[in-house]
Amino acid sequence: MGYAKIRSVALQGVVGQVIVVEADVAPGLPSLVVSGLPDAALTEARDRIRAAVHNSGATWPQQRITVNLLPAHVRKHGSGFDTAMALAVLAAGANLPTSLLVDAVVLGELGLDGTLRPVRGVLPAVLAASRAGAGLVVVPPGNLEEARLVPDVRVRAADCLGRIIGFVHGTESLLDPPPAPPAAQRAPADLADVLGQERGRRAVELAAAGRHHLAMFGPPGAGKTMLAQRLPGILPELTEEESIEVTALHSVAGALPPGGGLIRRAPLQAPHHTASIAALVGGGSGIAKPGAISLAHQGVLFLDECAEFAASALNALREPLEHGEVRLRRVHGETVYPANAQLVLAANPCPCARPGGDAMCQCPPGARIRYRSRLSGPLLDRVDLQVDVVAVRSAALFDTEPAESSATVAARVVRARQAAAHRWAPHARSNGDVPATVLRGRRFRLPRTVLQPLATAMDRGQLSARGLDRTTRVAWTVADLDGRDVPVLDDVYEALEMRSRSGR
């Protein structure tokens, strides 16, 4: 008979909370009851951890066992509590010493043979343990490299439950292999590969410099996909804080490549056009999982053939684009995932998209209308840059003059980003993120003579109030790229043209 406790971590979205796994062993019929809002995976852990204990050479207490997960009002999910539950039961009912685990946090799923298997979300879990003052974090070997990304906390691995039992008895040591060499990362596609698309290249550069959303319309083969795929290559590298946040999101989703370390480059997500609402914004049964827009956080969400997506799925992106986060409400609570991504849309002019444009189109008028109506007005109103990408002429493909590389464009983007960050501090770090109140405030308000083209377009019903603000932000980006401190009339004209597709 006895009582013991071991600490572990529960995740709510990408936020971890240290959980106390306490076990009480009392006289009575042999049983194991788990309380504290466990999910199905935790309820099923009863037989799993019993088999793991037996196959690790330890003795399972043949008494009434109660395992509680504190705080009891926080919902727990997943199999990452297995190892902590097994150790707490052994400490309470089999006199397993826990002095070496007093300030430790234990993570890991148990196999029936007692091996520790990797779990998702280890990076945010170790971050939570570090903030809670844990002196030691024990993880499965498959999660060791990810856990080591968190500084100021001692991380060790255990390949099986028997090793942890031997460690607390002083007969074995936890694993501490040397860090693996970083995995080679594939170089991003180069913008120099895109030939004869000056307008498209300019739009992509503006999008990168100001963190603006972008939509490209044009016939197949014009270069829309090539341009979108090269946008991450001209974005600045992520800061340390951004890298940790992005890596934590991929860890929770189980999309973190093994041995990849922190994600330093802006991620690119390009879901298929059959993707559901849950796949795009997050969701699923039980705990809501991050969707493509969250996995593209601080990077690019590219929807190729966007007019083929379900209209409901596209419209579900409107709130995340506006607020930079996704709030998924379920019966058991709310999960919040960051979703500050740049949206890039690419669409053909009609379903058949035949070469030769409208003259060769064989689509009935109704089909063209239905095709274009998938992109609703409220969604497009949130897209700062809307450009037509025309078919490439043969002369451009045979031109011997090389196009600008991604490195050259990226250098201009960095300078523009630095100018914007200095100007808008502390309100925003880029033109696309500056609040409207700051944009229209006395300090940064542009003269009416400069904004006259936007005022005229708004009075004609061609521009909404949101569209006016977004076009003004693009004008600031044009000025930053061209080295001007304040936008001039030509900058506003270019920004307006970049929002009206061909400038009509």
Image (cartoon, rainbow, N blue to C red):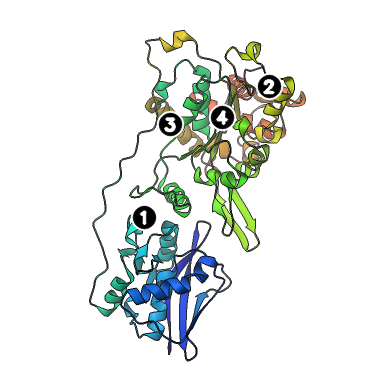
Can residue 76 be seen from the camera position used here?
Answer: no
- Mark 1 or 2: the one toward you: 1
Instruction: Give the Cα distance between marks 1 and 2.
Output: 52 Å
Quadrant of the rendering where the N terminus is positioned: bottom left
The answer to whether 482 is drawn above or below residue 429 in the figure is: above
Disc 1 element: helix
- Mark 1 or 4: the one toward you: 1
**Label 4 crowd bin: few (<14), some (14–19), many (20+), radius 10 Å:** many
Instruction: Give the Cα distance between marks 1 and 4.
Output: 39 Å
- Mark 3 or 4: the one toward you: 3
**Label 1 crowd bin: few (<14), some (14–19), many (20+), radius 10 Å:** many
Circle 3 is placed at which residue position? 234
Instruction: Give the Cα distance between marks 2 and 4.
Output: 15 Å
**Residue type for callout 4:** Trp
Q: Of the residues under marks 1 and 3, which one precedes in the sequence?
A: 1
Circle 2 is placed at which residue position? 453
